[in-house]
Image (cartoon, rainbow, N blue to C red):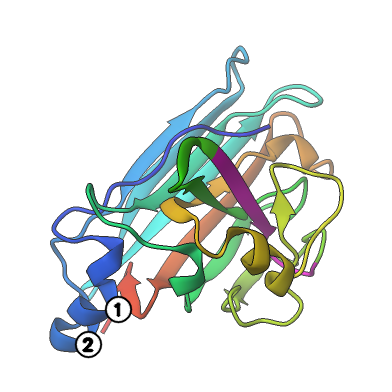
Amino acid sequence: MKAAGAFALVGGTLGGLSAVASAQGPDPAVTPFLQSGNNGFPKPNGGAAVFVDEGSHGQGVLLTSISGAPNEAGYGLAGLKAGKGTTVPFSSLSDVQTQYAMTQGTCGGGAPRWIIDLHNPSNPSQTASLLVYFGTQPYGGCSGGAQQEPNIMSDPTTAWWVNNGNTPQTTSSVESTYGSWTVDDIEIVVDAGWDQATQLNPNIQQVLLQKTTVNGFSLLPLPS
């Protein structure tokens, strides 16, 4: 299952994140864009993506995937979209990571996952989606509770699944092919409620995102 969509960066662009972060710290005016849906499946399949006020200036995002039948589920999505007119090559990404907690279910079924969408600047109609599953690489998987998803750009275990392909690739291999391609958006998706087989129907997969960073710019600050 692939949930469509992306998040918008309000008040900045990917190309300026490091400068904004170092000069001003996290900007409360920068708000992720959230999406959710049922992936075309009937109720009770569904999904949600909502902000969570954690108090003391803290903010999280809760993503939920609800499944009512085998191989069916909705999705919740949060993402960051490159600003219009900017050119951010994939090779310029140095820090992509997040804290998270599985509040219902566990990592599995390919979610939660990062999706980095790219296009070839020499041929904009040529696109690629790079997927990285949360948890143990290459196939994902984690227990419940608080987790730290490491920086996928520097973690030597990161496995990249290109266009939902069947064979994972290393970071060096992906960069050799797509390093000059332009970043369109960076997303986190939950859509594998169907994989939570230990729960009663409907099955639920839910993750709380906190302290998400991209190139040194911090979104979703922890309470201070």
In this picture, which residue range is highlighted in magenta?
127-137
Residue occupied by mark 1: 223
Q: Residue at x 60, y 78 (%)?
A: 150
* Mark 1 Cα shell of 10 Å, populated few (<14), some (14-19), many (≥20): some
Q: Amino acid at mark 1?
A: Pro
Q: Residue at x 63, y 39 (%)?
A: 191
Residue 216 counted in the magenta span: no
Q: Where is residue 23, by image quadrant?
A: bottom left
Is tag 2's residue or tag 1's residue first in the polypeptide sequence?
A: 2
Callout 2: SS: helix
42 above or below 162? above
For the N terminus, the image quarter is: top right
Please give the name of the residue rendered at 69% of the width and 29% of the height, measured from the top-left corner: 202
* Residue most extreme to the top: 42
Examine the residues drawn in magenta and state their main secondary structure: strand
- Residue 68, how many percent across, how many down? 70, 23
In x, y percent, where is residue 133? 69, 58
In the image, 73: left or right of 168?
left
Numbered label attached to residue 22: 2
Label pair 2/1, CB-CB below 8 angstroms: no
* In the image: residue 124, left or right of residue 168: left
Q: Depth check: give the residue in front, 203 or 35.
A: 35
Image quarter (top left, top right, bottom left or bottom right) of the C terminus: bottom left
Residue 130 falls within the magenta-colored stretch = yes
Residue 4 place in picture, x, y as percent: 50, 32
Q: Amino acid at mark 2?
A: Ser
Depth check, front residue: 29 or 91? 91
